[in-house]
């Protein structure tokens, strides 16, 4: 890879690094804050920090387009890249609406799903991806049905595994890094670089979002990252391995459905400020993580960052297993 292609990745990183601190101050001044549930103090933390991530990602990708056009004299895949940007911006806008209205109010489920369908239009109109999967040709059903289904499904379910400092951001870093590797190895280096722009932006944001969090990502980040995972899978024709990488979220969705989408992922704080499973049954991977950690930790005390680390470890295992199982397709 030409060293000049590091510029878009680094640009995304530094834009997010500097703009996030500005956003924290402005969000607090505007009253766009949320309570940190897993802290005794329940301190107020700036919300919707994903604005900075989207900002850094878009400028990083645009700088890549500039380098590609003027330095490499190439217009290959520009239509796909602009379609990707358009979809992410639409998804991010919907997430921002939810953040402004508040997660307890926000858009109702039917309205959210209906509006998210529009985010698939940029990919539908360019007939993105390949309609043949698992030796089946889905024809026009692929762009008209499967693309919207994939984007809406990934955008909404990525938001389920959340609520712990740094969890959403670190999961995005891991999954997108895995997909960047896969797209690079399968000959889609342009898509790999676009993906790395988001990875770099998320790494910069993680500095502020990790425990103890100074800013929450908000739905603008969770919807956008989930949607981007689906978009990369579609444009890179790597749907199967992307779905495999998404296994923790598939499990989380099943557990949420078990709770009729009403049970939350938050834990209960005990008198020692450590976490307890809030229900008799598990309604999230977070609850399973707390249960497992209580079994294996000598102190029996489980804290927020412990849960995040264990879920991240599970995600890393899934990614490595996926790379092994799909090695004949990838390598």
Image (cartoon, rainbow, N blue to C red):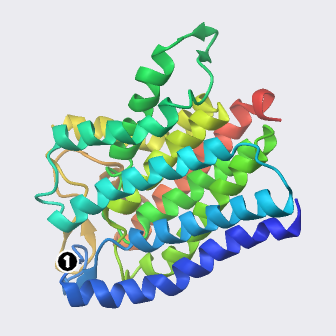
| Quadrant in the rendering for residue 17 | bottom right
Q: Residue furthest right?
A: 2
Q: Residue furthest top?
A: 136
Q: Quadrant of the N terminus?
A: bottom right
Residue 258 position, x and y percent, is 21, 35
Residue 303 position, x and y percent, is 35, 73
Residue at 85% x, 55% y is 73
Residue 122 position, x and y percent, is 48, 39
Residue 201 left/right relative to 208? right
The answer to whether residue 292 is visible is no
Q: Secondary structure at mark 1?
A: strand
Residue 35 left/right relative to 329? left
Residue at 69% x, 68% y is 9
Residue 245 position, x and y percent, is 56, 41
Viewer-proximal residue, 74 or 13?
74
- Residue at image mark 1: 35
Q: Quadrant of the C terminus?
A: top right
Crowdedness near tag 1: few (<14), some (14–19) or many (≥20) residues, C-alpha within 10 Å: some
Viewer-proximal residue, 203 or 290?
203
Q: Is residue 113 above or below residue 88?
A: above
Q: Is residue 276 above or below residue 52?
A: above
| Quadrant in the rendering for residue 61 | bottom right
Residue at 28% x, 39% y is 255
């Amino acid at each position: 890879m030409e060293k000049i292609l590091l510029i878009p990745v680094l640009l995304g990183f530094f834009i997010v690094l500097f703009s996030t601190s500005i956003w924290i101050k402005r969000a607090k001044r505007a009253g766009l804050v949320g309570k940190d549930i897993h802290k005794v103090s329940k301190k107020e933390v700036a919300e919707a920090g994903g604005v900075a991530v989207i900002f850094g990602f878009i400028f990083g990708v645009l700088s890549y387009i500039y380098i590609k056009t003027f330095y490499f004299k190439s217009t290959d895949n520009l239509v796909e890249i602009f379609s990707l940007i358009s979809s992410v911006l639409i998804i991010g806008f919907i997430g921002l609406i939810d953040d402004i209205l508040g997660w307890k109010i926000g858009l109702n489920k039917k309205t959210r799903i209906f509006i998210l369908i529009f985010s698939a239009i940029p990919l539908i109109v360019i007939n993105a991806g390949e309609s043949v999967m698992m030796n089946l040709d889905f024809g026009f059903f692929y762009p008209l049905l499967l693309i919207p289904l994939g984007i809406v499904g990934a955008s909404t379910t990525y938001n389920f595994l959340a609520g712990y400092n740094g969890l959403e951001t670190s999961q995005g870093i891991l999954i997108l890094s895995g997909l960047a590797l896969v797209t690079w190895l399968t000959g889609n280096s342009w898509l790999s670089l676009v993906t790395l722009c988001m990875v770099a932006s998320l790494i910069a944001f993680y500095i502020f979002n990790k425990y103890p969090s100074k800013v929450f990502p908000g739905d603008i980040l969770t919807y956008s990252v989930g949607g981007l995972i689906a978009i990369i899978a579609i444009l890179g024709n790597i749907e199967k391995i992307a779905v495999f990488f998404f296994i923790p979220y598939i499990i989380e969705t099943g557990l949420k459905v078990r709770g009729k989408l009403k049970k939350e992922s938050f834990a209960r704080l005990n008198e020692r400020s450590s976490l307890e499973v809030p229900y008799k049954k598990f309604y999230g991977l977070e609850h399973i993580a707390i249960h497992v950690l209580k079994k294996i930790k000598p102190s029996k005390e489980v804290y927020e960052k412990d849960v995040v680390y264990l879920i991240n470890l599970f995600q890393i295992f899934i990614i490595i297993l996926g790379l092994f199982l799909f090695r004949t397709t990838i390598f």
